[in-house]
Amino acid sequence: MAGPIGYLELEAFRNIISARLDFPAKTTFLCGTNGAGKTSILEAIYLLGHGRSFRSTRLDALVRSGGEGFVVRAGCSRPTGEQERIGFEYRAGRVRVHADGQPVRTRGDLARRLPIRLLTPQALQLLEGGPEVRRRFLDWGLFHVKPAFHECWQRYRRLLRQRNMALRQGGIEPRNLATWSEALAAAGESLDRFRRDYLAALMPVYADIQGRLAVTSDFVQIDYRSGWPAGRPLAEALERALKRDQALGTTTAGPHRAELRILAHGQPARQVLSGGQRKMAVIALLLAQVQLLDQQTGRASLFLVDELADTLDAQHLARVLAELQGGSAQLILTAIERTPFEAPLTAPAAWFHVKHGEIHEMV
């Protein structure tokens, strides 16, 4: 097996009636015109690692027209090197997810089996979207490199819901609300330390990659803000904001309000970088994450890339391909044409042609 996924089987998924795709190389290209089914293949793989689509919130939208459901299966490598068969079945509104025949209960269990990073034109939301997009970026990395983080994150979210419920109900004894606040502050401080430690490890990796990709004449900078005033304990910030929180019925300080600001020349990167530079900055951030995951855990990620050539000139495309192929991640990329990618490749690749939902290997 060349990477985390060895083969993929699809039944009645989007416009694909039935198909099997083997991945004999570390790099695989899916070529074809728009609407041929290339992105649907990436979507099916993403589903196996996240339990949801990146294009639709409704599973029934993934069912081939006229069908009652779909099946996605794959052979995936475990950290031990053994192969595991993962399946996602959706029929008549019911979902069944299994690994080697055993039920998989949560999306977290799926994600641990198949670390996936996705690069599509929508990935620019990392720069252009709201703070929650960048918090998810941080938390994806922590989920995969720090097993204790997920438990801490779940505890914080649970306590946050309980405190918000108490704020909305009103008439809560001050000492009872103080108990929720104290527990929330402790969990929030732990969550913040996880994020700060992760960023401290990520930034040198990112700086190296950014330098090789030559994103801009100056390095893009990262400014992390905890979600409450700097230099003040979270417990104090919660106490100071109590009256406002009671009036609003929600907690206004804490890591759920954290912001990861991505700057260029001291300004928000989305405002000063060109479209190509923004894409290069996002690619560098995602590459840094998968490289750090490999460094800290020895696990290779699966990098799904949709239409990489869009907005990149030949020089930048060559740099990105060299960086992608030089890392440990398995790569599955879509392209309308094969020609722009052949010369810049630094390692062998497998090529497949996708047309009307049918997949054929290219010579």
Image: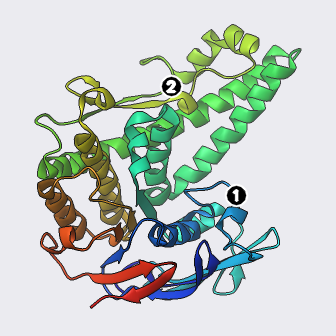
Q: Earlier in the sequence, mark 1 or mark 2?
A: 1
Please state if 160 lies on the left or on the right of 325 as rendered. right
Q: Quadrant of the N terminus?
A: bottom left
Give the residue displayed 54% in from the left and 87% down from the top: 19
Q: Nearer the viewer, residue 269 or 170?
A: 269
Q: Position of residue 314 (x, y in %)?
A: 14, 58
Q: What is the secondary structure assignment of the residue under circle 1?
A: loop
- Identify the residue under disc 2: 227
Q: Residue at x 47, y 66 (%)?
A: 39
Q: Is residue 205 above or below residue 100?
A: above
The image shows residue 362, relative to residue 58, as above or below, that is below
Q: Amino acid at mark 1?
A: Arg
Of badges 1 and 2, nearer the viewer stands 1
- x and y percentages locating residue 183 in the rendered image: 67, 32
Q: Residue at x 48, y 80 (%)?
A: 78
Q: Is 289 rendered above or below residue 245?
A: below
> How many residues crowd mark 1 within 10 Å: few (<14), some (14–19), many (20+)?
few
Quarter of the image holding residue 50? bottom right
Front-most of 85 and 148?
85
Q: Position of residue 199 (x, y in %)?
A: 35, 42
User: In terms of image quadrants, where is residue 253?
Assistant: top right
Identify which residue, 115 or 45, lies in the foreground: 45
Task: Give the Cα distance between marks 1 and 2.
Answer: 32 Å
- Work out whether 99 lies above or below 215: below
Residue 230 visible in rendering = yes
Can I make out residue 87 in this image? Answer: no
What SS does tag 2 mark?
loop
Image coords of residue 239 (percent x, y):
64, 13
What residue is shown with label 1?
58
Count of marks placed on residues: 2
Q: Mark 2 is on which residue type?
A: Gly
